[in-house]
Each structure stands twice: as structure tokens, then as C-alpha cells.
Image (spheres, helix red, strand yellow):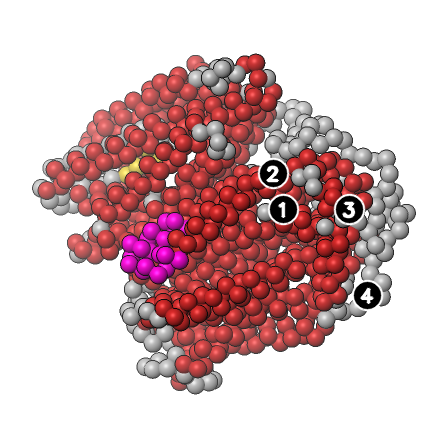
Amino acid sequence: MHEESHIASIDDGEEATRVPRHGPSPPRASKGAIWPLLALLLTVQLAWSLYQLPLNRVVERRLCREYYGTHDPTVVDPDGSVEEELCKNDEIQQGLAWVLGAMETAWIVGDFVMTIPLGFMAEKYGQKAILWLNLTPRIFTIAWALIVGFCEDLPLAAIVAGPILSILGGDCVFNSITYALAASLTDDYVTRSDTKLLAQYISKRYHWTFASAGYLLSAKAVVNFLLLTIVIPKILQSTQTTSALRSQPEVSDRVNVCYARICLAVSVFGALAIALAGTIWLLFPSLLFYALGSALPVFTLSLLKSPSVSPKQEDQAHESTETHLFSIVMMVKTLGSLLGAPLMALLWVRGIATGGSAMGTPYFPQYGQPPPQAYGQPPYGQPPYGQPPYGQPQYGPAQYGQPPAPPPNQDYGNGYGEKTDFDQAFKIEGPKWNDLWAGILFLIVFLGFVAVSGISLQGYAATRNYNGGGIYDGAGSVGLNTNTIIMFMFVLCVATVFSYCYVVLARTFPKQFIWVTGILNIVFGLVTAIYMLYQKSYAAGIIFLVFVGFLIFAFISWIPRIPFSALMLRTAVDVSKSYGHVYMVSALGGLLATVLAAWYSITFVAVYVKYSPGANPACSQGAGGCSSGTVTGLLVFITFAMYWISEWLKNTIHTTISGVYGSWYFHPHNPPQGATRGALKRSLTYSFGSISLGSLIVAIINSLRQLCSVAQRSEAADGNIFGYIAFLILGCLLAILDWAVEFLNRYAFSYIALYGKPYIEAAKDTWKMIKDRGIDALVNECLIGPVLGFGAIFVGYACALLGYLYVTFTNPAYNRGGDYTAVIIAFSFLIGLQICNIFTTPLSSGIDTIFVGAAWDPQALMTNHPDLYRAMVEVYPQVQVAIHA
């Protein structure tokens, strides 16, 4: 009879147990070694569980005090406290749900992205070091929540920055390492993750205090404890007595699957019962019934140690395989949480707004049925009739007393009382294809990129066996190989996920978005600087510290300008929800940007594979010879082409969105039909050459900056301080030039979208209008451009850090001397930066178009949008002088 034992770690969100398995008995040392692991699990999970209820109350307390301070100051005690029972109204609870959902999502995103890199670090530095590192974000999150909760000088939105240090390891990293440790000490080890929403759900729906909700959830934890430590082990022990299970592992697997299905059914119906429980007396048995399904992971994760899934290997290889296997499982599990956390928050807010049994909405997805919709209630995302959306300014009713002021080349009668299309509303006198030569040159460069890519990929495909098909099996040492392609795919995933989450954050929390961006960049830059100094890269570490100092100074200077910036961003977001197809264009543009980046990444590696000199079998394949000059020349060309194509894509999106916002600005009451389609058509026809020309200028500057960046890192690696400083100064000058051109392009392309002018003429006219009208003061006051730029830099640095960690811990043959590290970091940064820039283009396009419209016809702002004008005057009184300068 094989020895059987179990382990457990119980709290509201995490339970764990060990189940028996067939095979040789574990070493005797594992009997004592498992107890320190159990103590670690119990301590971490207990602390994390106890933190949840106070966190709910701290955030609710701040929201409650702010709400009643505005609506009914009489209920606020002299010490600033408000009775907890008064904090259960819908608006406060919706705010609480958004904050907790944002924190959960931020924690999961950082955790998800860093699971694989930290897994490699665990192999190099040991699992103990990573577990110690994992404690840092937990301590920081708790401490930061307390600081924000009780420091009135900090905005509540700043609490969302707490989980950002999950990039040092969160639940996914912690669980994958402890699973692997437990698997090496015992036979099987699994965990279960539950929802953290139950505490607020009970408190809001049944009007209980959080303390009382905690006692109720303790009863659920007791059921879990008894089930996982007594009942399930006894059941498994009884089934192990049969000879069939002892001799045939596949029979044991079938038993595990059978019990897993039973637990799944219990969990599903338990979730449904929680959703439908109308009183606390119905909720209590529903919770206990739901807890009976907590053994589901016992049977599902036990299958990971099944011989059919994880056959026996040598000890060292087996330990590494188990670590990677559990890391992958935790990544897949966390990917579900990445989607589930914001979804649960959204459904919870919807349930609060609807009221009644609809507050059980978050638990219906677990059952697979749509939530009920109360009769007469507005759909989610729309306020009751006549009321503004939650969190939006209390604008007065729209003014319909007079027709909207038309743009140039538009008479007052046209577009008022009858529908027009975009071409009629913004008619071009004598339309022609402007700057056609630039459009033709763009197409030639694109075809050249296609040709280089095709030839290089053919050479790569012909020598795929030499270059490997995975992370570790490439034999080539003369250039990049498949290992690098896999790294770039990770970079693409990180860039896409971060950029998408960044846009969602901006749409959901316009004002908080600005605070989070500033704090995020400071924290991330500081962490990167500390890591570089720890790695003894003193030059890079000092540069990052200087950069962090600049970020802190810039962020402090932002604070007075945040209200005006938040107003403009909120206006742009509101318009995007009602006019045109802004976010469809953004989504399609982001998808195309990701595809383009993937294409560029593969071509980048293929050029190295095809043309690197030395012992390279690809040199005899296809056309062209191998030399360092060929590699350098082709890399410069494809990088320039990638910059130009991505800039063209970004500016085409910008021009299209500008057409939508221009339609809203000049025709808010009777917008032109097909504004998105009409603006896109103009961007791809008459304005195609103009967009190509403006994008060409930026592409040339950015290509020079990229070459300067690579040279700067190369000089730093060689220890040439004078060369490093020279390239640093040159890079700064190019950055200033890039900023100036980008600044002008933003408004020139908005002007081109509406009036179809050639690029040079549009740039001159736009700049003259902005200066004459004093709109440059508004532009300087608005932070959206710098904020989005900082966001793109953050995504770029995250991708660069991932590339650095990947190439460091996989240690491919071609980079044993570190020759390609600078190149990989630079191009990883480039990919992240460009993808985020394209994702965020629609956010800035609307604001830029409003400024261009105000410069051209300020009367239209006051006539067509009096509420916006009044709000602008309220937060920035100088606007009255600016637009009449």
C-alpha cells in the first residue's frame, strides 16, 4: 500500500490539496520538506485573503466620504467618517466595483506577462529567490492601498497603481513554482481559485457590513477545509483499494475525470443558486453547495502527473519539465482570469444599476445563461432617459434653436433638415490626387519590403533544420534563428495585450487614466533602473534613474493641467460612443499593426538567417550573397519600410477618425451619413499621397533615431563612454525634431481629413490658424499627447525588458557573447512603441480635430456645443481669451 498524505491551504479564494497517485513512493526527505512549503502557502494565502475585506472597506470609505461630501455633507461626521449602511447606494458601489475590477485586471496582466520570463529566472537563480521576489508586489500592494485609503491628498484612482508590481510575480508565478515544488516532494498538488467578488456582492445585495460578510464566508471556508482534508482523501483512499486502479493508470484517470465532472456540475449549479438567492437564508445554503465543488482542481490538475500526460524522465529534466508545465497551466488559467476579471466587474456594475435579482449577474456566466434584464431598465452603458452617464459631467440639454455653423465651403442650408453624406458636408473644390509622387514612392517601398521578405523567408525555410524549430534547438551561431522569432511573438502578445488594456482604461476612467499613466511610468522606470544596477549595468541604470527623475518632475508639472485634459479626453470618448465607428477603426488598425509587426519580426530574423556570413548554409540558397554589409543594408531598409508603413497606417486611422469628429463638431444635430466610410475613402484616394508624404518625414527621422539607439547601446556595451555620449546627444536632437514634426502632423492631417489640401499647404495653414487663434495655448494645456506618448513608451519598455530577459535566460547560441542583445532590445522596444501608438491613435485624433475646428471656426464651438464650451471655461478660464486671440 503506497503512502498517502495531503496538503491544504484554505482561504476564500484559494484551496489546495494533494491526492494519491500510483508509482514509486517519494523519497523519505519529502515528509519533512513539505511542511515548510505548507507554512509558506498558509501564510501567503491567509494574508492575501485577509487583505480583501479591509480593501473593500477602505475603498468604499473613500468613495462614500467623497459622495456625501458633495451630495449631503450633513451625514459626514466631524472625523470624516460615514456610517457603513449609508455607503450601499448604487453610485458608490459602482465606483467600488470599477476600482476593484481595475486592480484585479492590473494584477493579472502583469502576472500573466511575466510568468514565462520569471520561470526562466527560477531556473537560473533558483525557485527560492523568485519566491522571495514574489513577496515584494504583495507587500507593496497592501501598503499602497493603506496609503491611498487614508491619505486624502492622493486621488483614489492612484490605488490602481498598487498591483503594477505584479510584473515581479503574482499568483500565477507563485502557484506555478509552489506546484512544481510540491510535485517534486509529493505525488500530486493542486489549487482552486474562487471569485473575490463575493464580499462586495453580499455586502451590497443584502446590506451587510463587510465584517458580517467575512463571518459568512468563513463558513464556506470551513466546508472547503473539511471537504479537501477529510472527505476527498477518504474517497480517494477507498478507490485506491481496487487492483484495477493500482495496476492501470488509465483507469485512475477515468475516475478522476468522472469526479471532476461531478464537481463541475455542483459548481455550476451552486453559482446559479448564488445568482438567484433573493435572501440571505437562500444564499447561505447556496454558498455551502457551491463550496462542495471546490474539489474540482484536485481531479483535473492531478491528471498533469498522469503517465499519459507527463511520462517519467530523468530527475533534473523532469524537475525542469514540471516547472514549465505548471507555468503553462497557470498562464492558461490566468488568461481566463485576464478576461474574467474585467467581465465580472462590468457585469457587477450592470447588476447594481439594474437592481434586484440582476445583482446576481456576475454568477450567470458560470452557469452559461444570459442575465435577466429588468423590464423598463435601460441597457448597460446607457443612463436612464434624460440622465447623463455615470461619472460624466452634468451637461444641459442640447441646443436646437439655431443651425450649426458650417465649415468653409459649406452653406448654412446644406446639411440642416436634410441628410448629406461626408463628401457633400466637406466638399472639395476641384478634387485631385494630392502629392501623388509620395504615394507612388510609398507603394514602391512597400513592394520592395515584400520582395526582401519573400527572398529572406525562402532562405530561412530552406535551412529550418539548421535554425531549429523551437527555443533551444537552433544550432546556428552566425545570426538570429527561430529562437528570436518565438521571442518576437511573445513581444507581440505583450504589446497587443498592454495596448488594448491601455485603451480600455482610457475609455473607462478618463481622469484616473492620466494619474495611472504618470505613476506607472515612474514605478516601471524605477524598477528597471534598480534591475540594471543589480545586473551591474551601471551606465544603463544611471540613465534610467535620470529618466525617472525627469518623469517625476514632468508628472508634478502635469497636476494643474489634469482637469482640462480629462475634460477633453472624456469629450472625445463620449463622442466616439455615438458617432461613426471609431473603435471599430481602432480595433482593425490595431489588428493590422500586430500583423505588420509580426511580418516585420519574422523578416528581420530571416534576413539574418539568409545573409549572415560564416558557416551559413542559407548562403547557397536562392539569390544574393552573404556579407555583413548586405545584412546591415537590408535591415536598415526593412526598418525604414516598417516605420513608413506603420506611420502611414497610424496617420490613415488618424485622418479617418478626424473626419468623424469633424462631422460631430460642425454638424452635431444632423451628422453626415457614412462619415467613417467617407473619411476613409478620402484618406485612401485624394489624400493618399499627402498622408504618405507626412509619414515619410517621420519615418526618416525615426529610422535615424533607431540607428542612433542601436549605436548608443553598442558603444555602452563596448565601454566607449565618449561614443555613447555623442550618440546620446544626437538621439536627443532627433527626438526633439521628431516631436516637432509629429506635433505639426497631428493637426495637419486633421485639416487634410476635412478639406483635402496637399500636405505642405495643410501644414502651413494649420500652423497659422493655431497661432492666430491662440489654440497653441490649449494644445500646451492638454496633456493627452504626452500621456499617450508615455503610455507607448511604457509598452515599449515592457517589450524591451521582455526581450532582454528572454535572450538572457534562453541564452541562444548566436548570442553567447551578447553581440545581439542591443539589437533585440532596440527592436522589441520599436514593436511595442508602434503597436501602442496605433492602438491609441483614435483617442488623440478626436481632441486634435476639436482643436483644429476651434481654430478654424470658434463660433461653432460656442453655438453647436455650448455645454462643452462652458465646461472648458470652468476648468480652464483662459480658453475665452485663447480662441478669440
Of labels 3 and 4, earlier in sequence is 4
Give the farthest residue toward the right: 413
Quadrant of the image occupied by residue 799: bottom left
Camera-side mark, 3 or 2: 3
Camera-side mark, 3 or 4: 3
Q: Main secondary structure of the magenta part?
A: helix
**Residue assigned mark 3:** 884
**Residue assigned mark 1:** 781
Q: Nearer the viewer, residue 699 or 12?
A: 699
* Identity, as a three-letter code, of the amino acid under mark 4: Pro
Of labels 4 and 2, earlier in sequence is 4
Of labels 4 and 1, earlier in sequence is 4
339 sits to left or right of 54 = right
Numbered disc 2: secondary structure: helix
Camera-side mark, 1 or 2: 1
Residue at 45%, 69% (x, y): give it: 727
**Residue assigned mark 2:** 563
Q: Which residues are magenta?
A: 525-543
